[in-house]
Image (cartoon, grey):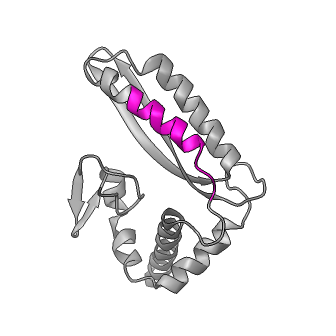
Amino acid sequence: MASCAACGSTLLFIKKRAGGLEFCNDKCVARGQVAIRAQHISESQALGRAIEMQYSLCPACGGPGPVDVFTTHTVWSALLVTVWKSTPAVSCKGCAVKSQIYATIAGALVGWWGFPWGLVVTPIQLIRNVAGMFQSAQTGSPSKRLKHIARMELAGRELARESRGAA
């Protein structure tokens, strides 16, 4: 299954293409320059930054790690409109579970009210959240998703450094 070149979200349907890469929305297309630059970041650089991130404090609560990439799946509906998304975030397991519990409760309350997609998507998103609650933070080597985020961060830093130098 395809994933967004900018944020790493799983793409059920490819919404945007740019520079030979696939993206989930216009915001990610705008970050496409970073994704293109990220292709030139070495594996050792990405791994080093991912290890730093993994054993740092949680960016959400400031608590101790390990941190990893956890995804929260949301859904809401109103008559003929259903909106759903999956949002990956770097956090500790506790912060991830809190976010997933909130999204599960909210989706269970407001996800069903759209026809036909609310009835189809809501159980999928709820099950994805419950499954995510049982995902543990990876110990040892960083997860593939954390390495992807580390690679994107390093590429963004390089582009920012270049734009400051050109100014």
Identify the image quadrant of the N terminus: bottom left
Q: Is residue 2 visible?
A: yes
Q: Is residue 113 above or below residue 3?
A: above
How many labels were placed on the picture?
0
Say whether residue 9 is magenta: no
Q: Is residue 117 above or below residue 40?
A: above
Q: Is residue 68 above or below residue 84?
A: below
Q: Is residue 74 visible?
A: no
Task: Give the residues in magenta.
Answer: 123-137
Residue 122 place in picture, x, y as percent: 39, 26
Query: Looking at the rendering, which quadrant does residue 130 occupy?
Result: top right
Q: Nearer the viewer, residue 116 or 40?
A: 116
Residue lying at 70% horizontally and 45% vertically, measured from the top left: 94
Judge left or right: residue 116 versus residue 122: left
Residue lying at 60% horizontally and 72% vertically, measured from the top left: 141
Residue 153 place in picture, x, y as percent: 52, 70
Q: Is the magenta stretch mostly helix, strand or loop?
A: helix
Q: Is residue 147 above or below residue 57?
A: below
Judge left or right: residue 76 versus residue 70: left
Identify the image quadrant of the C terminus: bottom left
Residue lying at 25% horizontally and 20% vertically, measured from the top left: 116
Residue lying at 63% horizontally and 40% vertically, measured from the top left: 97
Residue 2 place in picture, x, y as percent: 29, 58
Q: Nearer the viewer, residue 66 or 56?
A: 66
Residue 59 place in picture, x, y as percent: 67, 55
Q: Which of 116 and 19 is in front in this view?
A: 116
Judge left or right: residue 135 versus residue 122: right
Say whether residue 127 is magenta: yes
